[in-house]
Each structure stands twice: as structure tokens, then as C-alpha cells.
Image: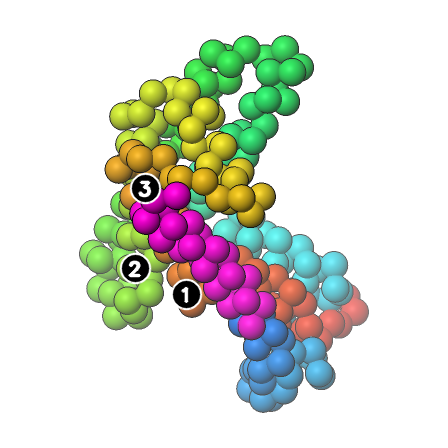
Amino acid sequence: MNEISLILDAYFYIAITVFLLGSLYYIISWIFSKKGITNTYLGFPNLFTYPGQVSKWDAIKNILKRIFLFSSIKYDKSTRIISLLFHYSLWIIIFAHFDLFLEPYLVSIGIGIQTIETISFFAGNTLAIIFIFSGLYLLYRRLSNVYLRKISNIDDYLSLILLLLFGFTGLLMRLLLPSFYAYNVVGPFISSLFSFHPTDIPIAPIFITHFILACTLVIYMPLSKLLHMFSFFTNPTLYSIFHER
């Protein structure tokens, strides 16, 4: 195995380790840190009354609406729609990467390789374009809005920039590399990492750049606001005081 592969393979395992341990540490910290004006631990006792919330089911519905519909963005519909496009396209792109491992199964049930690659190319490019342009809008909005600039910190910008670079390099991979490259070259390499039998990394500068950005994002996630997606069970709304109607 060449030196570049040794370094990048090690970087991948470091990234996964930092992500798992860092996420676990911060989630436990959230659970056992004091919160609210009562300065009490989460749920011991209930922290506050949430308007219109009279049951645990109401609490769950409120949180799910915030997570999946961005209901907290009430007064700016365009920003709400673009934020939804940004987040949903990102999640679909991430989960769509599993097609690298599913291709043999899809072929075994009668779906042609050419069909898989064509769908992947057009769907992937469309999602990447939506993700990049919606992300650029959110970055522009944060830079151009005086109030948002005042409350923003380096993490707000760095998270967006890393995500946009990740999406942009992924789009370039689809445009610059042969259609079979992802399935015949990248897929086996990623599989070798997860099976703990790492092989040489494919020597394609754009893929190496994309791979480094992906690992960097995984490391950065538990250190940034990107970890908010794991905060569901530590949300104080779940532990509000409920009243009968």
C-alpha cells in the first residue's frame, strides 16, 4: 500500500472514531447538564411550559414538525422552503451513496447496469445542484443580513462552506469521472475500509479531495452545530409541564 493510501485510510478511521466518541460525549453532556431558568437537569423536574402543549404526544409532534417541516421558521416562507431543499437534498445525497454497495443486488433482480448508472447520474446531479444553490443562498443570506451577521460565529460559516465544498466536489466527480468509476472503483475501496481490509485509494484527485472533505466533515460534526440532528431526545420540549385542556 502506498504512503498516500496509508495516510488517508488512517484519516478515515480517525474520523469515524472521533465522530462516534465525540457524538456520544456531547449527547451525554446534554442529558446531564443543567438547563433552563430553574437550573435543573433535563426532565428532573419538568423544565417549562410549552404553549399549546398538553401531552407527551403534543411534545413529540412539536419536535417532529420542527425537524421535518422547519415549523419554527414562521415568517419567512422562502427561507423555510430553501432550508428544506438544502437539508432534504443533503440527506438524500448521503443515503444515495449506499447504491455503491447495492449495485450487485439491483443487477441480480434484473435492473441493468446502464439503467442504474443513468438514474444515478441524472438524479445525483439534480440533487447536487439543488443542494449547492440552496446552500449558497443560505450563506448569502447570513452574510447580507445585518442581524444574522451579528449572531453568527465562525462555526456557522465553516459548517456551510465545508458542506458546499463536499457537494461541489461530489458534483465534479460525476461530471469528470467515467460513469462506471463510482461502482467499479470507489465502491470496492469504501467497502474495503468498512470491512477493515483497506486497499489503495483510487488515484483520482477529485475523488481524493471529496474523500478528505467527507472525513473532515465527519470529524467536525461533533465539534459543531451540525450535531443538532442528534438532539431529539435531549430537547427540553419533551420534558415540559403538561396541562389538561
Q: Quadrant of residue 201?
A: top left
* Residue type, label 1: Ser
Quarter containing the C terminus? bottom right
Pointer 3 or 2: first along the chain? 2
Q: Which mark is residue 202?
A: none
Above or below: residue 95 compared with residue 67: above
Crowdedness near tag 1: few (<14), some (14–19) or many (≥20) residues, C-alpha within 10 Å: some
Mark 1 lies on a secondary structure that is loop
Mark nearest the camera among 3 and 2 is 3
- Would residue 11 be counted in the magenta stretch? yes
Q: Which residue occupies 42% across, 28% down?
A: 185
Residue 158, numbered label: 2
Q: Give the CA distance from mark 2 to mark 1.
A: 9 Å
Look at the picture and state if 240 lies above or below 208. below
- Tell me the kind of residue under disc 3: Ile
Q: Quadrant of residue 133?
A: top left
Spatial CA span between label 3 and label 1: 24 Å
Whether residues under marks 2 and 1 lie with C-beta atoms below 8 angstroms apart, the answer is: yes
Q: Estimate the x, y position of residue 177 in percent, counting from the top left.
A: 31, 25
Q: Earlier in the sequence, mark 2 or mark 1?
A: 2
Residue range (magenta): 1-25
Label 3 neighbourhood size at 10 Å, few (<14), some (14-19), many (20+)? some
Q: Is residue 2 visible?
A: yes
**In terms of depth relative to the viewer, which is nearer, 222 or 10?**
10
- Residue 100 screen position, x and y as percent: 51, 30
- Mark sitting on residue 208: 3
Q: Which residue is mark 1?
A: 224
Mark 3: secondary structure: helix
Q: How busy is the neighbourhood of tag 2: few (under 14 within 10 Å), some, or many (20 plus)?
A: few
